[in-house]
Amino acid sequence: MRAAVLQAVGDEKLDVRDDITAEGPGPGQVRVRIAATGVCHSDLSGMNGTIPTAVPAVLGHEGAGEIIAVGGGVTGLAEGDHVIISWMPPCGSCADCLRGQPQLCLLGLAAGAVPHFKQGDQPLFAFAGTGTFAEEVVISSQAAIKVPDDVPFDVASLIGCGVTTGVGAVINTARVRPGSSVVVFGCGGVGISVIQGARVAGAAEIVAVDLVDGKLDMARKLGATHAVKPEDLADLSGQITGGGGFDYAFEAIGNPVTIRAAFDAARRGGDVIVVGVGRMDQFVQFNAFELFFNEKNFKGSLYGSADVRTDFHRLLRLWRGGQLDLEGMITRRSGLDGINEAFRAMQAGEVIRTVIEL
């Protein structure tokens, strides 16, 4: 089958091949024919080493498709079911799952740490345990979340990562209150999802911050009440908050400079939510006094603090109700041959999401 392979960390392009195989499904697994998969910035982070990635690997992790085979012992799923693929499948029995934090489940994540594919005799890993830049994937049944057949695959694929991460950061991690003020640093797919989540939560002021005019235009279209470049934020904050700062500041880039900027933009006693994925060798500086004196709530948000077993359906209900515009986030479509152009466009700030249709 065809797949897009990262041969080595640091490669600037993926190797699109037609000689990839995947065995299974084995017990507890399902085989899914991928219909659509989003090109997420985390895939780029796997390519450049920001996210530690075993290679060679089939990249992709934001996908949806149809089950074509079911392994032994699997219940609740059958051939023909449409599913969204979760890269953080909860095992359901570890301490994190039992305390209601399945997004922190390391057992489910570890299940994807073995090779899923082969290129001839060469084992290939699957990025984030999924590898959705392939025509078919074999995954644990917990990673396949059944959805109604009338949900378009392109819409479903976005819920697999970016939308869940961004909207979840608002409604699960921060629990934004109606009437509050919100600032969002970074207006890619995750940042735009944060903005939509803030709109759903009833925030009165939603400020988008980015360097790219096209992304700021998209932010306004999808829910931001204001959209500015970084150098204009201080003046706007003064107008909106009287200089006190925002109730909630979200960082959707993973850059130490913007993480610090988000911290500074939040009011005393406000909430700072880090949604973007940063490098392990980069650090953010705070002095000990400001952490104590300003009493800001500083939190990370992994996968939108979501329980995919319920939150995927919650997001679909919001989409059906017209509260989330997921189609509007898709700025380009392509086949697998266009995967490297999709990465170029993402790095250039030309797109919010490219969806690869297989």
Image: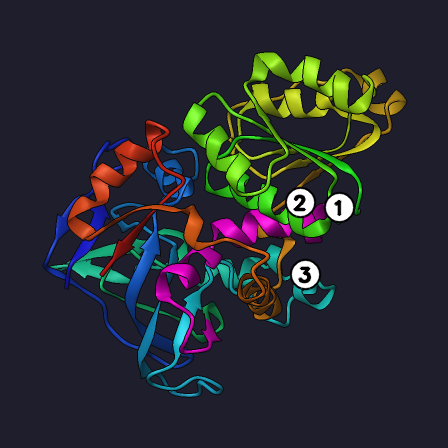
Q: Is residue 308 magenta?
A: no
Foreground of the two, 84 or 123: 84
Along the line of sight, the residue nearer the viewer: 228 or 79: 228
Task: Give SS at disc 3.
Answer: helix
The relative height of residue 278 versus residue 27 in the rendered view (above or below) is above
Question: Which secondary structure is most common in the magenta stretch?
Answer: helix
Counting residues from the N terminus, which is met first, the one under dot 2 or under dot 1? 1
Q: Kindly identify which numbered label has been placed on residue 176.
A: 1
In the displayed structure image, the side of residue 253 where residue 3 appears, left or right: left
Vertical placement of residue 160 versus 77, above or below: above
Q: CA distance from mark 3 to mark 1?
A: 24 Å
Task: Name the kind of residue labelled 2 in the image.
Answer: Ala
Q: From the image, which quarter does the N terminus lie in? A: bottom left
Q: Is residue 9 visible?
A: no
Q: Secondary structure at mark 2?
A: helix
Label 1 near label 3: C-beta < 8 Å? Answer: no
Find residue 263 and name its label.
Answer: none
User: Relative to 35, does residue 278 appear above or below in the rendering?
Assistant: above
Q: Say whether residue 289 is left or right of residue 165.
A: right
Q: Amino acid at mark 3?
A: Asp
Q: Residue 219 placed where, x, y %? A: 52, 36
